[in-house]
Amino acid sequence: MPIVKFVPQNKEIDVAAGTNLLKAADDAGLYIEGDCAGKGTCGKCRVKVIGGADEPPTTAESKLLSESELKAGWVLACQRNIEKDCTVEVPVQKDAHTRKTTLAGGVENLDVEPAVEKIAVKLNRPAVKDQTADLERLLAELEKGELHVKPRELAGFPSMLRKNSYSVTAAISGKRILSIEPGDTTEQLYGVAFDIGTTTIVGSLLDLKTASVIAVAAVTNPQNIYGADVISRITHASQAEDGLKQLQDKVIEAVNKIIHDLLRQTKIARDRIYEIIAVGNTTMSHLFMGIDPTYLAPAPFIPAYSKALEVEAAELGIRINPAGRVIFLPNIAGYVGSDTVGVILAAELDLPGDNCAAIDIGTNGELVLRANDKLMACSTAAGPAFEGAQIKQGMRAAAGAIETVSYINDGIELKMIDDAPACGICGSGLIDAASALLDAGLVEPSGRFVNPEENPDKIPAQFKDRLRRGNGGYEFVLVSGKESDTGEDIVISQGDLRELQLAKGAINAGLMILLKEADISENDLDRVLLAGAFGNYVRRESALGIGLLPQIPAEKIIAIGNAAGDGARMALASLTMRKRAFELSKTVKHMELSTRPDFQEFFVDALPFRKMQ
């Protein structure tokens, strides 16, 4: 069997001949971008072969890699099948999770109302005259009526009682005893809220006695190897052998990794975590639970379930208290999931109030409108452009990503995350760049670069060397290779602008449908809420400038952070909030955009970067 050595990670793995290099890296526990699900179209899975595997470049590699890169040994991992021993250099992936974790919050003002109760008791010792069984003795002391307990929780109970002088604590949820513990452990009551995103998974550890967040951790969703979007993952689940299990294993592995990190940060015992509340889009909820998502993809987009599902942690292989409960909040429709329920809960959109729209911009674009005290929601196929996928040098919001681009004093000014050397551009930078290039007169409202050959007089002198012809049309150099971290020019291409137009056009069109259905206009909106990490960092003026958002005053546009995660944390901390989440999913009117003939009209109208006056 061929041996693949990965550097600088210094990992080796034996693989069967013909194994794909992308899969080999995944089996070795290494993360490599796989946005196009191995089709060879995104060019993100670049690795450098420094020994062996010296076959000629594939068609995809010749298209997506420069001649100098090919000569230096760069290949696309998804295009390489391993036939002999080789050594591969895998670029170290930069952490892009800081913005996700710093936005965790949303439960500080809630009343403490956990679903799990802990009761410490001191039992009377048995005697010849009192031969009551240990469990019945405990149940009588608890005075909670009929309670159920599984044999697993009773396995060591008799010796525990006697070793601890008949002093124990019972963790109870509803009519279930989840755990019986030695001594008084009533101060140790914890749960974890998860936002299972298509791109990033975030977990928040809560002290359920105080409804406070005490630690947060995040990882990139490792399902990414099967594609950046939900359709790619649905396809893998339905067509690949063991595809569904592979996808479920990936997300459970990520959840356990986050739990391990949370415990490492806090030194809390694993079995003191009794509940998990999770939210995510409908596809993510199916994959998390190991339920076939096949029929979400074709019309009429029917999920296997919508209601909240509850299972034991041990059943899913999640490493908390084995009897701990895992609850995925309810979905609304095939492409409007429990993450949207979380947004509604956190933003209190289910309560009477003003005309308010909420937009959760991510790999999928979910929109909610409260108008005339009624709720409507829809989902648009925005694509992963806002997460940096399908953008020539796009990346997530990690150190070195261009995050702001401004046209100031007749020049283009940039800011990189952490002020690190530029290595790519993230979603907020992409929107900024399009807006700045519009202001500079280098991009037309149609989304096309000004043709420097046909209209040389329209190109300011300071930009003549930066607007050039690339492989797929014109491109603008944001950072020269001499100044970038990669040694390559960082550009925004004509294809990037097109991807941005498609993404923002879909979101804008979806909102227009909701407004039309509610019989109100953009001007009738009192507020627009931007949810998610992306929405928190995008500049409102740039988003308005390219037509992503409704044309309303910028002060009416408010970033509300990771509202989906906030909703999950609220439902974990408070039974009242959990019940609201269960109910509100039934009251939201879902608008299916694919059946609306006017959606295409709104979409086409929304494609230009600035609306024609």
Image (spheres, helix red, strand yellow):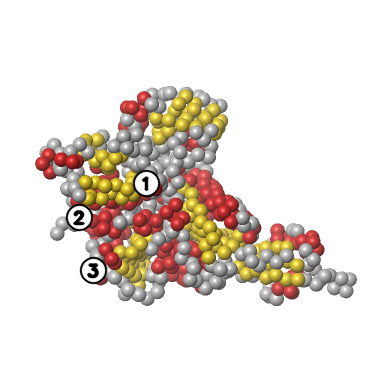
Mark closer to the observer (1, 2) = 1
Please name whichever residue, 297 or 90, is drawn nearer the observer in this view of the structure: 90
Judging from the image, what secondary structure is the residue with disc 1 in?
A: helix
Residue topped by disc 1:
419
Residue type (three-letter) at the residue carrying disc 1: Asp
The structure residue drawn at horizontal position 52% and vertical position 54%, both measured from the top left corner, is 289
Query: Cα distance, mark 1 to mark 3?
Result: 38 Å
- Tell me, yes or no, whether the two marked residues, 1 and 2, touch with CB atoms within 8 Å: no
Res. 268 mark: none
| Upstream in sequence: badge 1 or badge 2 | 1
The structure residue drawn at horizontal position 74% and vertical position 58%, both measured from the top left corner, is 155
Query: Cα distance, mark 1 to mark 2?
Result: 31 Å
Residue topped by disc 2:
610
Near mark 1 (Cα within 10 A), the count class, few <14, some 14-19 or many ≥20, is few
Judging from the image, what secondary structure is the residue with disc 2 in?
A: loop
Q: Is residue 374 left or right of residue 600?
A: right
| Upstream in sequence: badge 3 or badge 2 | 3
Residue 347 appears in the rendering: yes
Q: Is residue 546 above or below residue 516?
A: above
Residue type (three-letter) at the residue carrying disc 2: Arg
